[in-house]
Amino acid sequence: MAHKLLIVDDEANVISSLKRAFINEEFEVFSAISGLAGLELLAKEPVQVIISDEKMPGMSGAEFLSEAKRLYPHTIRFMLTGQASIEAAMKAINEGEIYRFFTKPWDDLQLIFAIRSAFERSDLEEENRRLLETVKRRTLEMKSIEKFFPGITDVKRDDDGKIMIDNLTQDEMLEIIQRCERDCLGLRDETD
């Protein structure tokens, strides 16, 4: 999946500065001038990382990031503000589960490294979710096989570590293999 970043700020010059800072980066940059516009863009374009200003007319950055978290919980959210009040920071952290907090003016290099780190984290979390789904699916498959062949999932090994299957004929083993192949093909058909 291509990496995508959303910048939400009501100041066009801030958006332009951030886009210039990211010009040599290997991710796509989207922008919105309000929290509402940011939510509309998120509904159309999946992004992994969001940077939002705090002080914006209509919807504050904390409100926007909180709503983004509710609707798109896997996004990684940054707060960027010139109004670094303790109250705004706490609200953003508590409600929007902010990954990092930056103040204006920001250091381009620090921000770039933080964004790269956020994309790496997003990739790892996505891979973890994918692996968890695979484990869940395989567990269900094993339970299904266990219904037809009770005790088959009890693994016994000989002194050399080779798997031993007691009381299983060659025909039964062939049937298990065929059933597994059919189930796997059936799963592939469902996901394609």
Image: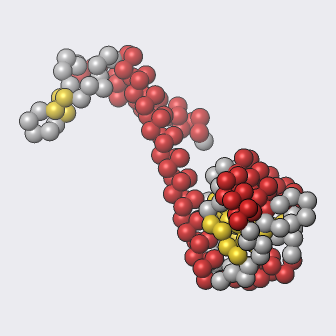
Does 11 appear above or below 143?
below
Task: Decide if residue 85 is on the left or right side of residue 32.
Answer: left
Evaluate whether residue 51 shows in this view. Answer: no
Quarter occupied by the C terminus: top right
Residue 67 locus on image (x, y percent): 77, 50
Q: Residue at x 36, y 20 (%)?
A: 146
Q: Residue at x 62, y 66 (%)?
A: 100
Q: Residue at x 59, y 35 (%)?
A: 190
Tally of numbered tags = 0
Does 33 appear above or below 66?
below
Evaluate whether residue 121 shows in this view. Answer: yes
Residue 21 locus on image (x, y percent): 70, 82
Chosen colour scheme: secondary structure
The residue lying furthest to the front in this view is 86
The residue lying furthest to the right in this view is 58
| Quadrant of the rendered image containing residue 8 | bottom right
Quarter occupied by the N terminus: bottom right
Residue 110 locus on image (x, y percent): 60, 79
The residue lying furthest to the left in this view is 159
Residue 70 locus on image (x, y percent): 72, 47
Q: Residue at x 30, y 26 (%)?
A: 153
| Quadrant of the rendered image containing residue 114 | bottom right
Task: Between residue 126 and residue 151, name the one nearer to us.
Answer: 126
Does 165 appear above or below 77?
above
Task: Between residue 50 and residue 1, name the one nearer to us.
Answer: 50
